[in-house]
Image (cartoon, rainbow, N blue to C red):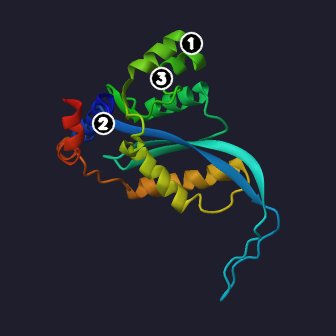
Amino acid sequence: MTSDFVWHMEDVLDLYGKPYDPKHPVICFDERPCQIIGDAVMPIPMKPGSPKKEHYEYIRNGTCCIFMAFEPLAGKRLVYVKKHRTKVDYADFMKNIAEQYPNAESIRLVQDNLNTHTAGSFYVALPPDEAFELAKKFEFHFTPKKGSWLNMAEIELSALSKQCLDRRIETMEKLAVEVDSWEKERNSAKATVRWRFDKSDARKKLQRHYFNLQN
């Protein structure tokens, strides 16, 4: 564990310890690739006393990317299915996030260090004036390298995988419909993550690593 890891970890943990503030919402962002898979043989539907039967062969219809923004203190998430994960796609999603919080003074964004995850991406997708104004809406907080477990959006993506992506979905359009339905259900229930690991816990449980940094 490096001093840089500790700094980014404590920065994120400090952010998670702050009370709910609608003027400065804390949003966790992450993305994941997703395969689009269809059936090579028509499955046999489920019927009383017999489960649905699927053939082991399948058709791979390409891949797409799922973008997740999660506000844990509000139990709210925004999920998009996109064909790619380019700088333009990132900028477009960030613009959509900003539009969800028109009254926020700043959006505190927790994300990893992927090369597209910078305000510089805004200038690839938008005119300079618009890109600059969008960049001012965000306050970037980065998880440390190999520290993606600190991003609560990863937990939401795991829930999405288990509750929605646990079956074959043959087109990107159908996937988008299924994901949208999952998002609305989770938002309606205000489902959230109860984060219980703070700076004090880190300094206690990782005491040996802190000591090594000072010696």
Horizontal side, residue 139 vs residue 40: left or right? left
Q: Which residue is mark 2?
A: 9
Disc 2 to disc 3, how far (Cα)?
A: 19 Å
- Please give the residue where the numbered disc 3 appears in the rendered image: 118
At label 2, counting other C-alpha atoms closer than 10 Å, the crowd grade (few under 14, some 14-19, many 20 or more) is many
Tell me the mark number nearer the camera, choosing from 2 and 1.
2
Q: Answer left or right for 86 relative to 197.
A: right
**Badge 1: how crowded within 10 Å, few (<14), some, or many (20+)?**
few
The amino acid beneath tag 2 is Met
Nearer to us of marks 1 and 3 is: 3
Residue 208 vertical placement versus 190 (above, below): above
Q: Position of residue 29 (x, y in %)?
A: 45, 38
Q: Distance from label 2 to label 1 (Cα)?
A: 34 Å
Look at discs 2 and 3 and give the one toward the viewer: 2
**Total numbered labels placed on residues in the image:** 3
Name the image quarter holding residue 144.
Answer: top left
Residue 79: horizontal and vertical position, in percent? 52, 44
Residue at 23%, 31% (x, y): give it.
Answer: 213
Residue that carries the numbered disc 1 in the rendered image? 127
Which x, y percent locates residue 24?
29, 31
Identify which amino acid the numbered label 3 is placed on: Thr
Q: Quadrant of residue 147?
A: top left
Q: Is residue 137 visible?
A: yes
Identify which amino acid the numbered label 1 is placed on: Pro
Q: Is residue 55 above or below residue 115?
A: below
Quadrant including the N terminus: top left
